[in-house]
Amino acid sequence: MWPDVEISVMDDSSSVCSEQAAVTAVDPVFVDYHDWLVVPPGIPDTRLLDHLAHRVSRNPADLLSHVQRVILCADQRRVDETYGTLLDLFIVLGDKGYALRLRLLNKCRGVLSTQQYGTLKAAALSGLSAIDVVPEAEHSRLCAGISGSLKIVSMTDAHLPAPGMSVLNEARDLINSDRIESARKLLESALLASPQDEEISRELLAIYRHTLNYAGLTAMLEKLPSAALAALEEWQALVEHLASGNKHEPC
């Protein structure tokens, strides 16, 4: 269970920026992120927001960074960024942390558009996954960015499709349309949600192999629990192959 985080922000009597008007900006690298929740050291600028976004990308389970991103974006009334940060928080919490999710959503209600608020309000109880269909979220770091439908064909009988097939079909359609980067992001989000899915694991691995994407490959391995990752030996073999400087695809 995710712990609740006490939050007291964005009331009518104060704002982050007004409380720090006389403080100079601080390099995000030197910020102690455990020292603050509501008011950060220095004037919050895009560098601090970018740094927090990077922390979330590197470690999606960093709940403190998620909350700090939401608070800063909402306090500066960055509409789309507030939506994206909340979306990331909903995704990482899953069906847990309902109280935290609802409290932050209510604090941000005046910043979000009607559509954005409605989407998040509908998911407040159950949470969201990275591959759920949601309105465009340019500033989300964890959402796969699916704005259409995952339903490829209509069901003609009572048999359910194999788990992950909709995501695989979506990814393969993107690959066939030369949208390799979009397919990679979709599969990465799906694998983070289901690291034991062998088909998704191998499909993503194939993209890393064909694009020789060593950085993306190793970054994903850092995020995934190795004990549960399907086709782990194949991932490790590709890491060794690319690390050796071999620019050809392994046989």
Image (cartoon, rainbow, N blue to C red):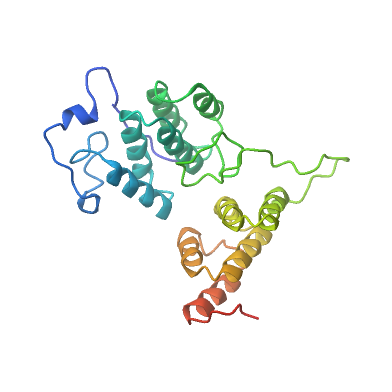
Q: Quadrant of residue 250?
A: bottom right
Q: Is residue 64 left or right of 192 when viewed as pictured?
A: left
Q: Is residue 172 left or right of 28 when viewed as pictured?
A: right
Count of labels in the image: 0
Q: Residue furthest top?
A: 12
Q: Residue furthest front?
A: 178
Quadrant of the rendering where the N terminus is positioned: top left
Q: Residue at x 48, y 81 (%)?
A: 245
Q: Nearer the viewer, residue 198 or 137?
A: 137
Q: Quadrant of residue 104?
A: top left
Image height of 54 relative to 88, above or below: below
| Image x and y of residue 118, in percent | 54, 24
| Image x and y of residue 56, in percent | 40, 49
| Image x and y of residue 199, in percent | 68, 60
Q: Nearer the viewer, residue 158 or 65?
A: 65
Q: Residue at x 40, y 20 (%)?
A: 110
Q: Residue furthest right?
A: 157
| Image x and y of residue 79, in percent | 41, 30
Q: Is residue 251 left or right of 43 when viewed as pictured?
A: right
Q: Is residue 155 left or right of 71 when viewed as pictured?
A: right
Q: Residue at x 28, y 46 (%)?
A: 47
Quadrant of the rendering where the C terminus is positioned: bottom right
Q: Residue at x 14, y 41 (%)?
A: 24
